[in-house]
Amino acid sequence: MQQLRSWLDAIIVALIVASVLKVFVFGTYRIPTPSMEDTMETGDFLIVSNLAYGPRTPMVLGIPMFQWYIPGVNLPWTRIPGHSEIQRNDIVVFNYPMEVKPISMKTNYIKRLVGMPGDVLEVRDKVVYIDGVPEETVPSMRTLQLVFVNEGTMLDRDVVDELDATILQYDQDRMYLVNARMDALEGLAATANVDSVVPYILPADYQEFRQRPFDFSKGFVNHDNMGPIPIPYKGEVVELSLDTWHLYKDIVTRYEKNNVQIEGGEFIVNGQPTTTYTIQQDYYFFMGDNRDDSEDSRFWGFVPKDHIVGKAWLVYFSWDFKGWPDFSRMFTVIHNQ
């Protein structure tokens, strides 16, 4: 009996220590999808620094290690100051904002921060512009490209493989649809038989984008052409109108928990008619590095500051696509810029 009690005491202490470390120091995260390739690979296991932007004190009463909590019990919380500020191009883990759960119990997502509070973001033919200036290209970022070859020839698949690109589709009109890294485009264009390489831009009548269940994206053509999108910041006074409501609906109702009614085009917030709303916290805009295979802020909109978890720091383990340990990626420090 004494030995059993000792084991139980040790397990309880271990759970408490692990929970404290997970909440206040670092967390772990597994990359489940290809949305961040090639910066992050499917099968990577990460250590995420909660200290970077400041850990959040517990928001619910539960056991963080097991994602278990008592429903309906919400704790007053704060964010302890971190050792760095969140910056553009950081690779960030955050709680998926569209999920209906207490914030800290929502699913963790990982994306690259491309838009800061106060920025005006626009996507023009796949290129992201911040305040009218095109974003700096991330070499490991992937996009869809159309590769046209010369008459009567074919694309050399061995060269494509060497460039770590993937042929997704071939058209009889000498055209290949290729998913390629940004730092491979020059090599792809210089490949024998290749006439030209141009970005694949979604047509204006592309419907799948608008059919997604997100109010935010319904106001845009598609995710290759969006904006301008002003990214809200704390204290900003925004105009409420039927034209701008798709931008602010989730902020006003879901994240900042106001009751809103719209009657004849007039907005009634918490029982008071108004044409404006004052933003209560900063918001951010995230995208995956595999730009054409990532559901991100282009679809569901802004991420509130209170949903930010931490900064991706280290790959401590990884599985390759064959299910074997990928030793080449283990203990790799993540470079955010």
Image (cartoon, helix red, strand yellow):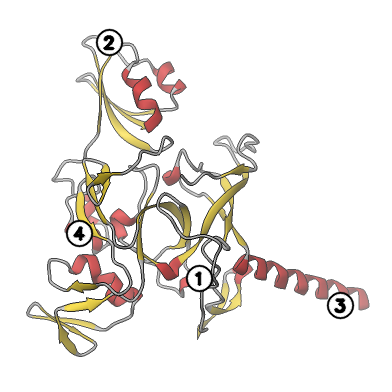
Label 4 belongs to which residue? 218
Instruction: For label 1, count other residues whose C-alpha is less than 10 Å away and answer few (under 14), some (14-19) or many (20+).
Output: some
Instruction: For label 2, count other residues whose C-alpha is less than 10 Å away and answer few (under 14), some (14-19) or many (20+).
Output: few
Label 2 belongs to which residue? 153
Instruction: For label 3, count other residues whose C-alpha is less than 10 Å away and answer few (under 14), some (14-19) or many (20+).
Output: few
For the point 19% across and 54% down, which residue is it?
228
Spot occupied by residue 72 in the image (x, y as percentages of width and height) = 48, 85
Report how far apart the C-alphas of labels 3 and 4 lie in the structure: 58 Å
* Mark 4 residue type: Lys
* Direction right: furthest residue: 2
Quarter-of-image position of residue 44: top right
- Mark 3 or mark 1, which is nearer the start of the sequence? 3
Spot occupied by residue 259 in the image (x, y as percentages of width and height) = 26, 84
Q: Secondary structure at mark 3?
A: helix
- Mark 1 or mark 4, which is nearer the start of the sequence? 1
For the point 43% across and 17% down, which residue is it?
158
| Tag count | 4
Report how far apart the C-alphas of labels 4 and 1 lie in the structure: 27 Å
Residue 70 visible to the viewer: yes
Label 1 belongs to which residue? 105
Report how far apart the C-alphas of labels 2 and 4 lie in the structure: 41 Å
Could you tell me if the residues under marks 3 and 4 are in contact, i.e. CB atoms within 8 Å?
no
Which dot marks residue 5? Answer: 3
- Mark 2 or mark 3, which is nearer the start of the sequence? 3
Which dot marks residue 130? Answer: none
Report how far apart the C-alphas of labels 3 and 2 lie in the structure: 75 Å
